[in-house]
Amino acid sequence: MSRLPSAGRVPSALRDDIPLARRTVSPALRRTGGFRRGLVAAALLLGGCAAGLIVFPQPLRRLLAPPPVQGLSARPGLDGRLLGHFPYGEATDADLVSIAPGLELHADAAEALVAMQEAARAEGIDLLVLSAFRSIASQKHIFFDVKSERNQSAQQRAQVSAPPGYSEHSTGYAVDLGDARRPATNLSVAFETTEAFAWLQTHANRFHFRLSFPVGNGQGVSYEPWHWRFEGSAEALKTFEPAQRLDR
């Protein structure tokens, strides 16, 4: 009469079918090994995150940081643009000079603008300054309040107006120009049909002014034939270098 195996023991015939590792590692050791593997995986994950912060600090910071503009859920892209617009600081009071009642520009841009207006006037062209420096607070009103009035989405509004903190006007280097003889074309694409715009296309470079948003511009902002920025100083060139690089 054959004997049954005692409790807790495995017949030798069956033991031969069990892999050696499973036969020799106790349940307690198996639990310890799983815990260690978990620790290693966690350490690798933390190490990867730390390495990412070192190698790619800006993208991760943008991803983890709150949205830069209160009231907008949009986040900047890898090149810093928000809804197509680059970030810009605000000119200080010491930087600005008056060019007309209620209108100010950076001193360097103001001098070049006055010279450009005088040259245009000598040829029968009356360049009218419609808008110049705008504070970030003013840009906030223009962006959000008009967006609400027109029932626009943030993306729609950004096509024609920069979010606060992302407008070239806040630098003191940008102006919106019109033709004093054709006021109906002010701040519209129709400005491109005026003699003033034709004159600017031919002569603006001599005074270091450049059209910011031409047709098909790399920023994806709507065409604005009236919006020009000054690039005639080292500081101005540095300020607009990211936008210049994008349109090369």
Image: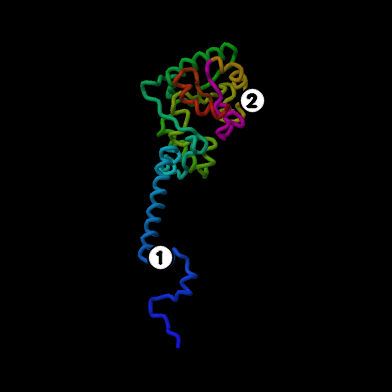
Q: What residue type is labelled 1?
A: Thr
Coordinates of residue 64 in the picture (x, y in percent) = 41, 44
Q: In which quarter of the image is the C terminus?
A: top right
Coordinates of residue 118 in the picture (x, y in percent) = 53, 13
* Marker disc for residue 24: 1
- As helix, strand or loop, the secondary structure at mark 1 comes to helix
* Marker disc for residue 235: none
Is residue 69 shown to the viewer in this render?
Answer: no
Coordinates of residue 142 in the picture (x, y in percent) = 46, 36
The residue lying at 50 percent from left, 25 percent from top is 241
- Identify the magenta region: 207-226
- Crowd class of label 1 (few under 14; some 14 to 19; many from 20; radius 10 Å): few
Tell me how far mark 1 sits from mark 2, CA to CA: 89 Å
| Front residue (pair 20, 207) | 20
The residue lying at 55 percent from left, 30 percent from top is 246
On whether residue 142 falls in the magenta region, the answer is no
Q: In which quarter of the image is the N terminus?
A: bottom left
Q: In this view, which residue lies farthest toward the front?
A: 1
* Marker disc for residue 193: 2
Coordinates of residue 238 in the picture (x, y in percent) = 46, 23
Helix, strand or loop: magenta stretch: loop
